[in-house]
Image (cartoon, helix red, strand yellow):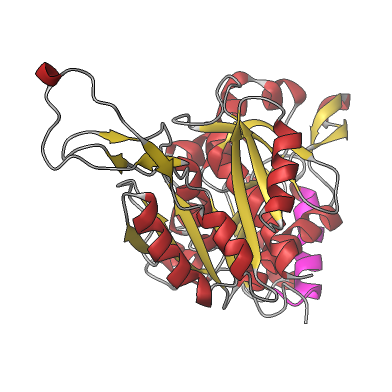
Amino acid sequence: MGALDGRHVVLGVCGGIAAYKAVEICRRLSDAGAIVSPVLTADAQRFVTPLTFSALAAEPARTSLWDGPEPSPHTLLGQRSALVIVAPATARLLAAYATGLSDDLLTATLLMAHGRVLVCPAMHTEMWEHPATRANVATLEGRGVAVLAPGVGPLAAGDVGPGRLREPEEVVAESERLLASDAALTGRTVLVTAGGTREALDPVRFLGNRSSGKQGHAVAEVLHSRGATVHLVTTVDRPVAGGITVHRVESAAEMEAAVLTLAELADAVVMAAAVSDFRPKAVAGTKLKKEAGPPEVVLEPAPDILAELGRRKQPGQVLVGFAAETEDLVANATAKLRRKRLDLVVANDVGAAGAGFEHDTNAVTLVGPDRAPCPLALTSKRAVAEAVVDELVALLQR
């Protein structure tokens, strides 16, 4: 059975010359077993007709919030669909979706979508490369929307360049890849850690680090959106999607106790937390006073949770570690991979501009035992999380 077989798919069609390709996309989706619900904007109907899509799809094409048999068609479509595809997606659609504007059936359905969303832009080169369009695309990618970037080729009015809608077979292949990834995580339990641990010096002060927990939380959100059962052990108070089980901790010892218990039933563990390497050997029972002068703080090693997970690793279990480095990024990550029996290390150069702790963006290198290091250029932490989860899915399917 294919990834699309029996799955509800909304095919949104916007107004542009590339709308003619959406007819073939609809046919190929139907041939792959998808239950296709076409949604055409008013401008799309200037190029193609609803009747054409109704003849090819499982359901009649919808064109309005108001004229169909359902009182709330966007609610029905958004809640039941495993995937919403917009092909072609115009610059206007990208702007409306990025800003949450809902003024027709397609944009309302996108805001209701419970499953994955794939947008396939098509427009003239100048529009595709305009800073506003690029910013809208980045916003959508940061929210977990998949974007199938346009190709280079003939455009309307005899122009040639970037902006051409990808071919129907490419759109369908990307749709199958997205849903296959989700299917691979359905029924899987994944444990994720996030944030920096705090090691008490006294009742007021602590030793810690600058980790915001944003990257670990992004990984948990992506896993949840793809159907995994997610346990998140975190030190930070950030909102999470309903359905993610949150375990709040503060110190490395508290994180160790939670992680080692939860890991026993996990198919995979993603240790994104920045766990302290050292902690004070003794914790003062009362606040250390300035008048007493600088205290002498003796440190001892904190629990190495990742190393212990490696020692306890179960057959088939996948372990993903993170490495925050300031030098020799790949060499240090590779050593950590081997030393702790990991399947993947996400190496983070925390000295790079816009990457690492506290930022909304990140630049990482994925390091595995049987592959060349894979660098990811600076992008949103949600996009990094998507890439990490893609790797995790591949490791679970070995």
Residue 260: in magenta span: no
Q: Is residue 141 toward the left or the right of residue 199 in the image?
A: right
At which x and y percent is residue 128? Answer: 69, 27
Vertical order, 20 against 141 (above or below): below
Q: What residue appears at the point 77 percent right and 43 percent down from the top-left corner?
A: 18
The magenta segment is 20-34
At which x and y percent is residue 114? Answer: 48, 63
Residue 30: in magenta span: yes
Q: What residue appears at the point 42 percent right and 45 percent down from the top-left corner?
A: 103
Q: Is residue 303 toward the left or the right of residue 130 in the image?
A: left
Q: Nearer the viewer, residue 261 or 185?
A: 261
Q: Is residue 17 toward the left or the right of residue 298 in the image?
A: right
Classified by dominant secondary structure, the portion drawn in magenta counts as helix
Vertical order, 40 against 89 (above or below): below
Q: Is residue 332 toward the left or the right of residue 243 in the image?
A: right
Q: What residue appears at the point 70 percent right and 51 percent down from the top-left corner?
A: 339
Q: Nearer the viewer, residue 5 or 389?
A: 389
Q: Quadrant of residue 34?
A: bottom right
